[in-house]
Amino acid sequence: MKKYLSLLFIAITFTIVLGGCNGSDLYNSLNTSTCYVQISDAVENKSGSKVTYDYNLTGYNKSGDSKEVKLSENRRLRKDAYLRVKLKANDDVMGWEEVETKDIPQKAKEKLDIKE
């Protein structure tokens, strides 16, 4: 009887652990890219009481390769700010953070026309 209870306990634990893991999140976190953008003017979209600000930007990775970035926020971002944008494999934005020019790779700086 103890043997069966032990096996049942292991099976339940195994099921709970596997059920709590989301494999697609792991894949998405491994299959990402980073690019750097400079904030320009936003397009304001109103839908009822909700307002979003859409940005269509050109971003550059550390090698200087360009990528179109579509960013939508609930607040207006600071004009001319520089952002590090994390992108999924399908180019959807996963997240972003404002950075200083010293934190931007040299080739991306050149493409963004940053003079220091």
Image (spheres, helix red, strand yellow):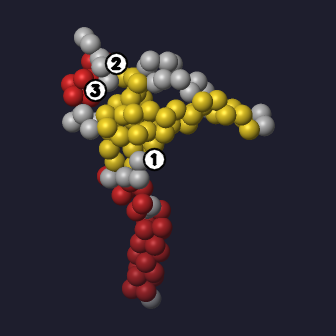
User: Do the numbered discs 1 and 3 sit on residues whose CB atoms are within 8 Å?
Assistant: no
As helix, strand or loop, the secondary structure at mark 1 comes to loop
**Mark 2 against mark 1, which lies toward the viewer?**
1
**6 displayed left or right of 30:** right
**Mark 3 against mark 2, which lies toward the viewer?**
3
Residue at 41 percent of width and 72 percent of height = 14
Label 2, on which residue?
100
Task: Give the mark nearest the N terminus, 2 or 1.
Answer: 1
Label 1, on which residue?
92
Disc marking residue 115: none
Label 3, on which residue?
111
Q: Is residue 21 above or below residue 79?
A: below
Q: Distance between the residues labelled 2 and 1?
A: 23 Å
Q: Is residue 74 above or below residue 10?
A: above
Residue at 40 percent of width and 75 percent of height = 10
Q: How far apart are marks 1 and 3 (CA)?
A: 22 Å
| Label 2: few (<14), some (14–19) or many (≥20) C-alpha neighbours in 10 Å | few
